[in-house]
Amino acid sequence: MTENEADSTADFPAASGKPAGKIRAGRNRTITLTDAERQKFAARLVRPEPGSARLDESRIIGRTINADLLDVLPLLPDAFADLIIIDPPYNITKDFNGEIFSARSGREYDDFLEQWFPLVCKKLKADGSLYLCGDWKCTAALQRVMERELAVLNRITWQREKGRGAKSNWKNCMEDIWFGVKNPRDYHFDVDAVKQKRRVIAPYKIDGKPKDWQRTDDGNFRLTYPSNFWDDISVPFWSMPENTDHPTQKPEKLYAKLILASSAPGDVVFDPFLGSGTASVVAKKLGRLWCGIERDEEYCLLAEKRLETAETDRTIQGYSGGVFYERNTPAPKSAGEKMRRPSASENDGQV
């Protein structure tokens, strides 16, 4: 399920307006907007008109672009992004703030991807990387479209905690992320930045000393190399401060792994289906630059509010001290923590 709404007016009817106000529990931390905030954040959006002059990097870096993807892509400079993360509408019927993306035949979904994917790839630098999200139903189409434009290096599968049960089929609780690069001989990948900290169940020793693990005041842990199967991700829900009303929001921890592995501090992260802003927010928290395109104004405003919050709050749930923790494992509270800490540049996060 995608965090983002569609890119073409042909695929959507006119929006039906803002959703009705919801009554929320007192402990509900879902991000909302007041009328005053809507006015404030709307002034920060870039809203190019179709046929406008091309936008140089000074007008798009660190900005949220409120526009239709196909209208604005020709206005953006080519080869400006070091990393692109794409979470398009999957081939399922979904309501995005009153606009419906409808499920379609496999061939029609292929055509939908071909409308914009080759154009997005032109925005990637020669040594850049791209991640493309999907589910079981559309993953074959994603592989096909990526193989025509990039060198495919891997497919990540991640497990969602949430998922509706099924009586006559297997419960769907897995999603894919395809990993491709412009040049398989020249691209950035920092494996040390995405190691996972796992609790050691059987603390094996040699000559009385820990083998490949460390003893801390919070327990015994091992730093492990990341695989292409991730089971440590929690989907945002009402008690998490990153949660919004976007129906298919991606977790900040998920995107933190992609951004830390495939970009360096100061690099540009581009998301052409920004949704409620996760890619931009995580890029900012990790000291990268960002640019995002989103058609729905309400989602753009939520993204801007989250970016403002990231000025003072750089926390990412499940990531602390430069390492990723297993799901439902709290970060250590002891002052004697010895694992790698983020560098100053990683914590900088400013444009």
Image (cartoon, rainbow, N blue to C red):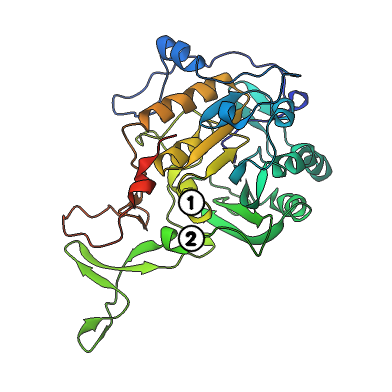
Point 47% across, 63% down: residue: 191
Quarter residue 321 falls in: bottom left
Q: Is there CB contact under 8 Å for labels 2 and 1?
A: yes
The N terminus appears in which quarter of the rendering?
Answer: top right
Distance in Å between CA atoms under marks 2 and 1: 8 Å
* In this view, 337 is above or below 241: below
Residue 63 percent across, percent down from the top left: 53, 28
Q: Does residue 317 show up? A: no
| Quadrant of the image occupied by residue 209 | bottom left
Mark 2 or 1, nearer chain start: 2
Q: Callout 1: 10 Å neighbours few (<14), some, many (20+)?
A: many
Question: Residue tagged by mark 1?
Answer: 264
Q: Amino acid at mark 1?
A: Ala
- Viewer-proximal residue among 331 and 190: 190
Picture coordinates of residue 333 (x, y %)? Answer: 19, 52
Asked which secondary structure carries label 1, the reply is loop
Q: Quadrant of the C terminus?
A: top left
In the image, is residue 215 above or below residue 165?
below
Q: Can the viewer see residue 215?
A: yes
Q: Picture coordinates of residue 270 (x, y %)?
A: 58, 39
Q: Which residue is mark 2?
A: 190
